[in-house]
Amino acid sequence: MFHSVNVFTGETLYRRPDQDYAEFERRLADLKMHGRAFAQLGVTERAARLQKFAGRLEAEKERFAEMVCEEVGRCLHECRAEIVKSIELIRYYARLAPELLAHKTIATQASLSQVRFEPLGVVFAVMPWNYPVWQVLRFAVPAMCAGNACAVKPAPSVARVSRALFDLASDGIPLAGAWLDEADTLKAVEDTDAMAFTGSTHTGRILAAHAGANLKKTVLELGGSNAFIVMPDADLERAAAEACYSRFRDAGQSCNAAKRIIVTEAAADRFIQLFLAECAKLKMGDPKHPDTTLAPLHREDLRDRVHGQVEDAVSNGAVCLTGGKVPQGRGGFTLRRF
């Protein structure tokens, strides 16, 4: 089941059942036909269509930013930045594609030697919820520049904005949704020509193993545990401000957020004071409100997981310096400072 809720209020925004695989096969056949026609246009015309798509997204950027804000829970200004960045990404690749993908003739002893860039066919992607517009377009736009079609299984919790994105793309470019459950997702890997995945290492291993067993080309972007290291000669005021921003930007739900802050002993006491002072400036609340700087977490299970990590750390000797309690009420959980 694909089910979007307003993270702050708990209101249901959109719901749709999983797609029957026979229906997906029919849609996939249509997408393959559309993809072949799209590939035959040539790279200049493909780039022109993507430029038009960028224009349509730009015209709808506030609507998309608000949908992302409601479904993901990030602050509205952060969601606006995602949409603007996505528009620039489309235009960047569309501008460079005719040059980068041009056939190249190489001088050799043969009568003709060329480097040619031919599409693979349909690229199947399994995408995460944290940047539902950017993550899809980051993979799909360069793939479509090269003449591929793209079928995307979005995260179930961002179904509404994903559907809106696919509808916006339906005019002229081969980008479509794949509303599949877990079992049928593996079937789709078999029935398409390549796979892209962004998400956890656990799921990545499962998908990569299945793709490998079926000899499918694969691109994976998996989770990390980024360290923020503070050395004794650092500008501690700036380090504390940057650490707070990196940890709590997008409620910390970003692959490149600082996951671990490692401070040398000589700097630790002063840094902790400065870091707590920065955290105290954060304001929890409705992510649509311009004064909010600390957005909710995306789902209840993620809230519970974070709270469990805090409790586990404390039970093993950590000291909770601020926060550490679950806020009351419906909707998402805002990460308290600790």
Image: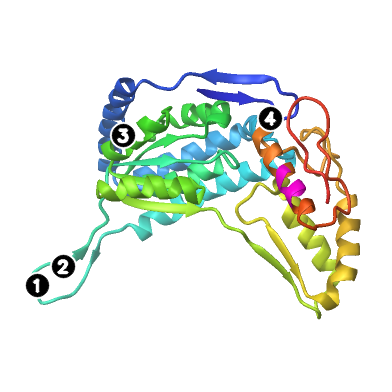
- What residue is rendered at 16% in x and 67% in y? 113
Vertical arrangement, residue 258 with respect to residue 42, above or below: below
Q: Dot 4: few (<14), some (14–19), or many (≥20) neighbours within 10 Å?
A: many
Residue highlighted by disc 3: 187
CA distance separating discs 2 and 1: 6 Å
| Residue at x 48% of width, y 48% of height | 202
**Left or right relative to 89: residue 32:** left
Q: Residue 34 is drawn in which quadrant?
A: top left
Q: Is residue 309 magenta?
A: yes
How crowded pointer 2 is (Cα within 10 Å; few <14, some 14-19, many 20+) is rated as: few
Please give the residue where the numbered disc 2 appears in the rendered image: 113
Question: Looking at numbered disc 1 in the image, what kind of residue is underneath it?
Answer: Ala
Which residue type carries mark 4? Glu
Question: Dots 3 and 4: beta carbons under 8 Å?
Answer: no
Q: Secondary structure at mark 3?
A: helix
- The mark lying in front, picked from 3 and 4, is 3
Q: Nearer the viewer, residue 31 or 201?
A: 201
Mark 1 = which residue?
A: 110
The part of the chain drawn in magenta is 308-312
Residue 150, quarter of picture: top left
User: Which mark is first along the chain, 4 or 2?
Assistant: 4
Residue position for label 4: 70
Query: Which label sits in the foreground, 3 or 2?
Result: 3
Three-letter code for the amino acid on which mark 2 is drawn: Ser
Q: CA distance from mark 2 to mark 4?
A: 53 Å
Q: CA distance from mark 3 to mark 4?
A: 32 Å
Q: Are marks 2 and 1 in contact (CB under 8 Å)?
A: yes
| Label annotation for residue 41 | none
Residue 147 makes an appearance in the image: no
Q: Amino acid at mark 3?
A: Lys
Identify the image quadrant of residue 317. bottom right
